[in-house]
Amino acid sequence: MVGFIPEAELDRVLARLAGPYRLYVPVSCAGRVELGEWSPGIRPVLEGRAYGTAKQLFLPRSEELFAFGTHPDGTPRVVQPERDRRPLALFGLRPCDARAIGMLDQVFLGQDPPDDPYRERRQGALLMGLVCSRPGRACFCAQVGGSPAGTAGLDLLFTRIGGGFCVEAVSTAGEAHAAQEDWPAATAAQVAGAREIQQAAAPAAMATPGLAQELEARFEDEVWARLHEKCLGCAACTFFCPTCHCFDVMDAGSYDHGTRLRCWDSCMFPKFTLHASGHNPRLSGKERMRQRVMHKFCYYPLRFGPEACVGCGRCIEVCPVNLDIRAVLAELGGSE
Amino acid sequence: MNPLVPQVATIKNIVVETPDVRTFVVEPDHGQTFAYRPGQCAMVSVFGVGEAMLSISSTARRGGPLEFSVKRVGRVTGALHEAEPGHRIGVRGPYGNHFPVEDWAGSNLLFIGGGIGLAPLRALINHCLDERRRYGKFDIIYGARSPQDLCFQGELMENWPRAEDVGVHLTVDAADGDWKGAVALVPHFLEKLGPSPEGTTAITCGPPIMIKYTLASLKKLGFSDHQIVTTLELKMQCGIGKCGRCNIGSKYVCVDGPVFTYAQLKELPQEY
């Protein structure tokens, strides 16, 4: 069943979620769209997509894994932090970003042992997507197997039509939530309007089957020496990527009083793979660029299936030297 | 339970092996030491300094405490070398696969170690010695920079040579006055000894440059890719296939390794 929420009702729908959930919506922040915690009076931005990714809600830029210190008798103690146990709810999530969360799930939950802090945040999270009616200049989700109206990773799909939103449950959790909310059914005309928007938004998918195998054979290709040349190694592409998930683990403080932190890290940094001995298997920008591209389009697919790129285009938008992953793929003989 | 949170453990004893290698004997403060197999690793924490992935040099079936034989190289290993018995550290693991000893029944075993690479081999050699009858002849080839850099001298000079049908062959890169043994790099020494590949499995651990040339020497001696087993080490932060830094192609050394046959290694990109 397709429900209908009039635009004027949205505020009340969000308010009901905000109690049991930690609710995040796209908000306007210093001229940009960012995901922010909803509170009464906040109007979600329904155009464009957030500048930052939703991954930081599940894998924060920096988080405390535990605190350490000593008991009065000198023996050490390790204390794990208390977290807000309310599940997350995300409204206005773009289908590409929802799909990326599914890819992170493979890494953090799909292989043993699961990552506990990630699982705590992910468990019970309600992901409410919003169909994209207008692609951005760097969007290319359809070229990597996604769609502006895709439902992968989502619980509820919202399609904005004149006067409100058509809402469809696209997961078991979404169905349970829809049943509880009991939204009035959309009229046939409203459903038809939503379908039209969804279809117009979704161009023919142009995923590139066999790219992973093809790339695997091109590890030593001379193209890598050329591709990385203008890259500065700033790692903005990886920090803004919704599927990049590399992290560092480090201690702050001292033996008597400190914390162990997990922070985002990037394969684009020279120290990422530096051994204590001084040996570094990825010595230059060439190896690091190859690692980033190969991880997304070869290594991750060989391990988990889909390509670890959802075509959100953030890496293209934030790159200070206009390195365009679409052009890189074209050069490698993948999708254009 | 967060898999990145270590067990608190106490350093019970420290054995000075060489000027820059010490063996740390470690027992958890609460509960049991985890079960492990030869070749597996563990993350060792020095609180306030950080964590490092270390291979376990003790043998689980001997029932004793965990042992880590550690060369002083970086920040964490440097801090460990400063520690004294009684110091509390963190331990989590075990991580990675293990040496496929179950495939080696009836086979001669040729162990080739260099420097601190003898640490994981020691766990393996002692494991195999305890089921000596399952295998054929043992040969242990071990080299270090100088005589004083030979690790586990008690085992090298006493225990292992005395065991049934075990040959121990030592070499150093540079001798001092008292050294009567061979002076050669491990790959050259190996070629000179010329062990037959017939019915033999070769297991080699050591610094990357030694492994590279040892693999070539083994090929020269006629060993097939499946008869050669080695271990890889890469920078690691999590040990559970998530932090994303120890991959070689689509394999993660922390979960798919550290033990690989040469045949498996050849399938991977040359980036380690």
Image (spheres, helix red, strand yellow):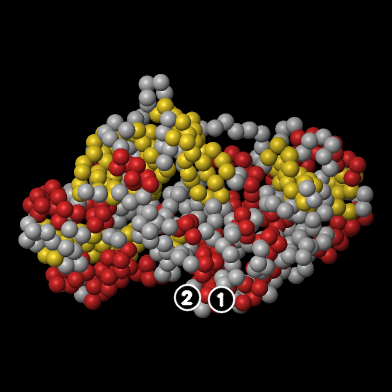
Three-letter code for the amino acid on which mark 2 is drawn: Glu
Marks 2 and 1 in Cβ contact (< 8 Å)? no
Is the same chain shared between marks 2 and 1? yes
Q: Which chain does tag 1 point to?
A: A
Which is closer to the viewer, label 2 or label 1? 1
Image position of B238 (left or right of A176): left
Q: Quadrant of residue B27?
A: top left
Image position of B144 (left or right of A272): left
Q: Residue at x 61, y 54 (%)?
A: A239
Circle 2 SS class: loop
Query: Around disc 1, counting alpha carbons within 10 Å, would you say few (fewer than 14), some (14 to 19), or many (20 or more)?
Result: few
Res. A202 in view: yes
Q: x%, y% of residue B98?
A: 33, 54
Q: Nearer the viewer, residue B77 or B27?
A: B77
Q: Quadrant of the C terminus of chain A?
A: bottom right
Q: x%, y% of residue A136?
A: 78, 62
Q: Residue at x 35, y 62 (%)?
A: B260
Image position of B128 (left or right of A121): left
- N-term-proximal mark, 2 vs 1: 2
Task: Give the answer, above or below, for where B134 lies relative to B50.
Answer: below
Q: x%, y% of residue B122?
A: 22, 51
Q: Which residue is mark 2?
A: A220
* Marks 2/1: CA–CA distance: 12 Å
Q: Residue at x 64, y 75 (%)?
A: A330
Res. B37 in view: no
Three-letter code for the amino acid on which mark 1 is drawn: Arg
Q: Which residue is mark 1?
A: A226
Circle 1 SS class: helix
Image position of B112 (left or right of A61): left
Q: Residue at x 53, y 50 (%)?
A: A247
Q: Nearer the viewer, residue A205 or A34?
A: A34
